[in-house]
């Protein structure tokens, strides 16, 4: 984990759903050798993500666990509603309106929001402005018409 200020990347979902995007981002995170922490405020969303990570592909799954379960600290991907980082993850994924919390120790934070939801879009704009005013290292990613991720800011 890094003591430096992390990069905070906003992912604007317009053409894909969280179910389609999150597993790929987690795979790339694991390819870097990083652990991941997926934070959501909605326990039902965490249940959905938990199921999805086991079943998102016929030939693969993403090993993960839930905070509060035995061996949570050893999990390569941990799902939580807490602001703690029990698995010493380098990557933090915010997938709903969950608090970003203290980002110290993370190398990269991902804020994934549904651009088709007015409340989520508005919340992301407020979060971007607040973080920008604090001098955070921000990037904004959106999908091209072909579905590829492009850095837009």
Image (spheres, rainbow, N blue to C red):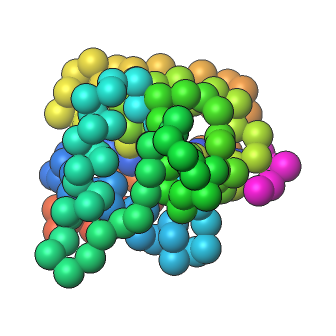
| Res 22 seen here | yes
Q: Nearer the viewer, residue 103 or 76?
A: 76
* Left or right position of 100 against 43: right
* Left or right position of 20 against 150: left
**Which residue is at 44% across, 51% downward?**
65
Q: Which residues are magenta?
A: 1-5
Q: Nearer the viewer, residue 146 or 97?
A: 97
Residue 131 occupies quadrant: top right
* Left or right position of 20 against 137: left
Image coordinates of residue 56 in percent, x first then y, are: 20, 64
| Res 111 seen here | no
> Residue placed farthest to the front in the image?
70
Image coordinates of residue 43 in percent, x first then y, are: 33, 27
**Which residue is at 33% across, 55% downward?**
22
Image height check: is 49 above or below 119? below
Report the predominant secondary structure element of the magenta stretch. loop
* Left or right position of 53 against 140: left
Q: Nearer the viewer, residue 96 or 115?
A: 96
Image coordinates of residue 4 in percent, x first then y, are: 82, 50
> Residue placed farthest to the bottom in the image?
59
């Amino acid at each position: 984990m890094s003591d430096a200020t992390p990069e905070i990347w906003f992912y604007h979902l317009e053409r894909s759903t969280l179910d389609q995007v999150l597993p790929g981002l987690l795979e790339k995170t694991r390819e870097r050798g990083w652990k991941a922490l997926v934070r959501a405020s909605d326990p039902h969303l965490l249940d959905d993500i938990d199921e999805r990570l086991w079943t998102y592909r016929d030939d693969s799954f993403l090993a993960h666990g839930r905070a509060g379960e035995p061996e949570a600290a050893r999990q390569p991907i941990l799902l939580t509603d807490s602001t703690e980082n029990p698995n010493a993850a380098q990557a933090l994924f915010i997938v709903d309106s969950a608090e970003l919390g203290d980002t110290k120790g993370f190398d990269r934070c991902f804020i994934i929001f549904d651009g088709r939801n007015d409340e989520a879009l508005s919340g992301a704009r407020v979060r971007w402005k607040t973080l920008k005013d604090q001098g955070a290292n921000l990037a904004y990613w959106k999908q091209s018409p072909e579905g590829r991720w492009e850095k837009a800011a």
